[in-house]
Image (tube, helix red, strand yellow):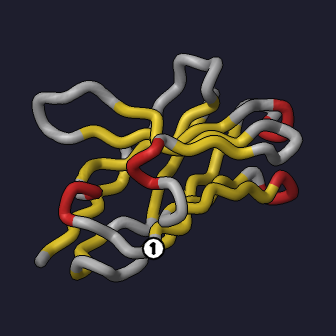
Amino acid sequence: QVRIVESGGGLVQSGGSLRLSCTVSGINFKIYQMGWYRQTPGTQRELVAAITSGGSTNYTNSVKDRFTISRDNAWNTLFLQMDSLKLEDTAVYYCKPVSSPYWGRGTQVTVSS
């Protein structure tokens, strides 16, 4: 059974930082490309950052130079360091093995002015 649990969200002021974590069980974590997605009400989930099994990273333009994705294969854990947060980063954030159908429940990030 695949289990994905995101954590680390919360309320932060504009310009602040948060670090999201995601633990994954039930799959061979280290072989999967992993992604962080986000969703706001009424919109589709957007892939904001991805990391391959080998550690190569990719970011959507709106978060480049502010967000950093990383992984710890020994602990089956994915991270997203979010700095210089903006109001428009407010969303529910999800992690997912990119090529799989599995989703967690997400973690809410709210950026206030």
Quadrant showing the N terminus: top right
| Observer-nearest of 80 and 4 | 80
Residue 29: name its quadrant: top right
Above-or-below relation of 49 to 31: below
| Observer-nearest of 46 and 4 | 46
Amino acid type of the residue tagged 1 in the rendering: Asp
| Observer-nearest of 10 and 104 | 10
Residue 16, x across and y down, in percent:
34, 82
Above-or-below relation of 110 to 112: above
Q: Is residue 94 left or right of residue 14?
A: right
Q: How many marks?
A: 1
Residue 59, x across and y down, in percent:
55, 44
Residue 113: name its quadrant: bottom left
Give the residue drawn at x 44%, y 39%: 37
Residue 3, x across and y down, in percent:
57, 38
Q: Is residue 65 left or right of residue 88?
A: right
Give the residue drawn at x 76%, y 31%: 32
Give the residue drawn at x 14%, y 74%: 112
Q: Is residue 20 visible?
A: no
Which residue is label 1 attached to?
83
Above-or-below relation of 79 to 97: below
Q: Crowding at label 1, few (<14), some or many (≥20) Cα neighbours within 10 Å?
A: some
Q: Secondary structure at mark 1?
A: loop
Above-or-below relation of 49 to 67: above
Residue 15, x across and y down, in percent:
31, 80
Give the residue drawn at x 52%, y 61%: 67
Q: Is residue 68 visible?
A: yes
Q: Is residue 34 left or right of residue 41?
A: right
